[in-house]
Amino acid sequence: MIAPLSAARWLLLLVILAGVYFFHGFLVPVLAALVIAFASWPLYRRLLAAVGGSRTIAASLALLLILAFLIVPIMWAGSYAIVEIREWVGWALVTNREGAQTPGWIAQLPIAGEWLDEQWTRYLAHPGGIGEIIQLVSGANIGSIYRGVVAAGTGAFGLLLTLLFMLIALFFTYRDGETFAAQVDRIGERILPHRWGRISRVVPATISSTVTGMTLIAIGEGIVLGIAYWLAGVPSPVTLGALTGLMALIPGGAPLSFTLVSIYLVASGSPFAGVALFLWGSIELFIVDKTLRPKLVGGPIKLPFLPTFFGLIGGVKTMGLLGLFLGPVLMAILVSIWREWLHEVDPAMHDISASETDALPPAIEAEPIAQLARQKPHSG
C-alpha cells in the first residue's frame, strides 16, 4: 500500500509535469512580461498612487504606455524601411531597363573587389540582367521560395501571438503581482527559511539594473558612434547611429556595426576616416565592456566581467533577446548561492556577501518582494 502523503506528492509531481508539457509554449511571453514588470515596477508604483490605488486602472494605463513604447519605434522603423525599399525597387527597375556599371567602392574593395566587379559586369551591366536573375532563381527554386514565404508568414503570426500573450501576462502581473509575490514568499520561506530574504531581493534588483544598464549602454553607444559617423563623413549618421544603438543590445552587435561602416569608408576612398572610426569604436567598446557594463549589468551582486559575459552570451544563445536579461539574473543567483556556501565554510566571508547583497538601488530596496507580500492589495 502507498501512504496517502506519498501518493499526494506523486500526484502533485505528475500534475506539475503535465502543466509544463502543455504550457511550455507560454514560457517565453510570461518571462518577458516578468522582466518588463520588474524593470518598470517603481514607475508602476507611482502610477498606482496617482490613480488612487486602483490596480485595474493602473495596470491598464501601464500597458498602454508599454504599447506606445513598443509601437512608436516599430512605426518609425517601418516607415524608414518602406522608404528604403521604395528606393531599392526604383533602382532595380532602372538597372533592369538600362543596365548599370559596377560602383567604384565595390570594385575597389580589397581581395574581393576584382571578382565582384567581374560578376557585376556579367550579370547586371546589360539591360534585363535583374529580370534574368529573378527568372533563373524563381524557376529553379520555386518550391524553396514557396516554403520560405510560408515559413516567414508562420513566424510573423507566431511573433504576434507571443506579443499578445506577453501583454496579457503583463497586465495581470501589474494587477495581481503583489498578491502572487506574497504567495511566492510564503513558499520560499518554507523552502529556504534563512536565505530566501536575500535571494528574493537579488532577482528584482538584478533584472532592474540589467534592463536599465543595457538600455543606457545602447543609447550611449548609439550617440557616441553616431557622432563618430558624422565626423567621419558617413551618409545618414543619425540613422546609422540609431541602428548601432539597437544592435548594441545584442552582444557583438555594436562592433559589427562600426566595423562595416569602417570598411565602407575605406572602400569608398577614405582610408584615414575608416581606420580612425574603427580605432574610436574599439577603444570605446573596450572601456564600456571593462568598466561600465559589469557595474551596470551585475546589479547588487557586482558580477565580475567573466560571469557577466557568460550570462549575456549564454542567455542570447539559449533564449534570444530575452536571454540578455535572464542570463545575468541566473549568473547573479549562482554567484549569490556560491557566496552563501563560502560563508558557511568561512564565516569571515559574511561581511563581503552581506554588503554586496544589501547594496540595492533605493527604488528596489524600498520594495523587496518580502515587503510586497505584507502590503494589503487594493481591489480593482
Image (cartoon, grey):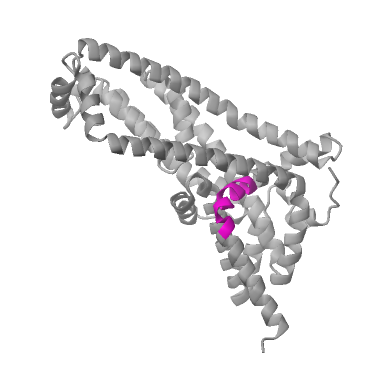
Using the rendered view, name the quadrant where residue 202 is placed. bottom right
Question: Which residue: 86% across, 46% down?
Answer: 378
Up/down of 96 relative to 288, above or below: above
Q: Is residue 311 left or right of residue 172?
A: left
**In front: 158, or 189?**
158
**In front: 22, or 241?**
22
x then y, percent, for residue 359: 67, 53
Up/down of 292 relative to 238, above or below: below
Question: Which residue: 61% across, 49% down?
Answer: 30
Q: Give the magenta range.
A: 22-35
x then y, percent, for residue 327: 52, 53
Most extreme residue toward the bottom is 1
Using the rendered view, name the quadrant where residue 118 is placed. top left
- Please indicate, yes or no, whether residue 331 appears anywhere in the rendered image: yes
Image quarter hosting the C terminus: top right
Using the rendered view, name the quadrant where residue 257 is placed. top left
Q: Is residue 208 magenta?
A: no
x then y, percent, for residue 375: 84, 53
Prevailing secondary structure of the magenta residues: helix
Question: Which residue: 74% across, 54% down?
Answer: 368
Up/down of 77 relative to 89, above or below: below
Q: Is residue 30 magenta?
A: yes
